[in-house]
Amino acid sequence: MPTINIIASQDIFAREDQPAIVQGPAEDFGGMNQGSHRRKPFWKWDNSDIFSNVPRPATIISATLYIYCGTAQANSNAVQTKVCDADFSDTTLTWNNMPAVSGSDIGGNVFNYSATGWKNAIITATFFGWFRQSANNYGIVQSNIYFDAGENAITRLGHDGTNDAYITVEYQPNSPFMIFI
């Protein structure tokens, strides 16, 4: 079956200790359990990228989210990945205006940044909603990113053509026509 990789079109992070400042790409987000130093990375895939890369009609077989961790944190915990409840822009997002999130963890709580390399989670149901337009595609956010108190390192995630976050979609093209013999 065909597969396609769709690279995130937007990525940014928000910092609790700088709540009104637009930060920049999610590559340098870091998450520390030191007072108000929490940070949240956000990613979004434009609908036009989804619709132009996966033919319609098609059956979505699987969708897997991949995020690269370039600098590991020894005591990182499992990270939750959730869908955003409202849209955001990577040119304006701050801690003060970041979208709310709801629902359960779409990544199965499998993200852990205690080792470098690619991290992945099956997000087929979420991608299917985006593809069928039965769910709003406002992007995703990771939260509950904490490290032991006293750690002062940044977790670096891939960005700008080097290890960008992406979704691999496996699909079965469906013919829009039925042939009866």
Image: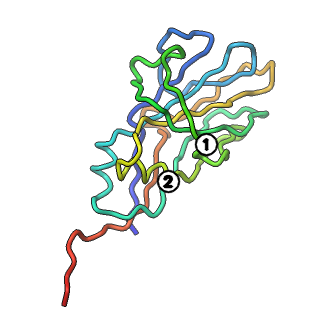
Residue at image mark 2: 125
SS for dot 2? helix
Residue 139 appears at what percent x and percent y? 45, 36
Instruction: Give the quarter of the image for residue 172.
Output: bottom left
Depth check: give the residue in front, 174 or 160.
174
- Residues under numbered marks 2 and 1 in contact, where contact means CB atoms less than 8 Å apart: no
137 w.r.t. 18: above or below: below
Instruction: Give the quarter of the image for residue 171.
Output: bottom left
Residue 16 appears at what percent x and percent y? 61, 15
| Labelled disc at residue 104 | 1
SS for dot 1? loop
Q: Residue at x 44, y 29 (%)?
A: 86
* Neighbours of disc 2 within 10 Å: few (<14), some (14-19), many (20+): some
N-terminal label among 2 and 1:
1
Q: Single out the residue that lies furthest toward the bottom.
A: 181
Q: Residue at x 33, y 42 (%)?
A: 47
Depth check: give the residue in front, 134 or 158.
134
| Labelled disc at residue 176 | none
Instruction: Give the quarter of the image for residue 30.
Output: top right
Quadrant where the image shows the N terminus: bottom left
Residue 5 appears at what percent x and percent y? 41, 51
Residue 125 appears at what percent x and percent y? 50, 53
In this image, 73 relative to 180: left or right? Answer: right
Quadrant where the image shows the C terminus: bottom left
Q: Amino acid at mark 2?
A: Ala
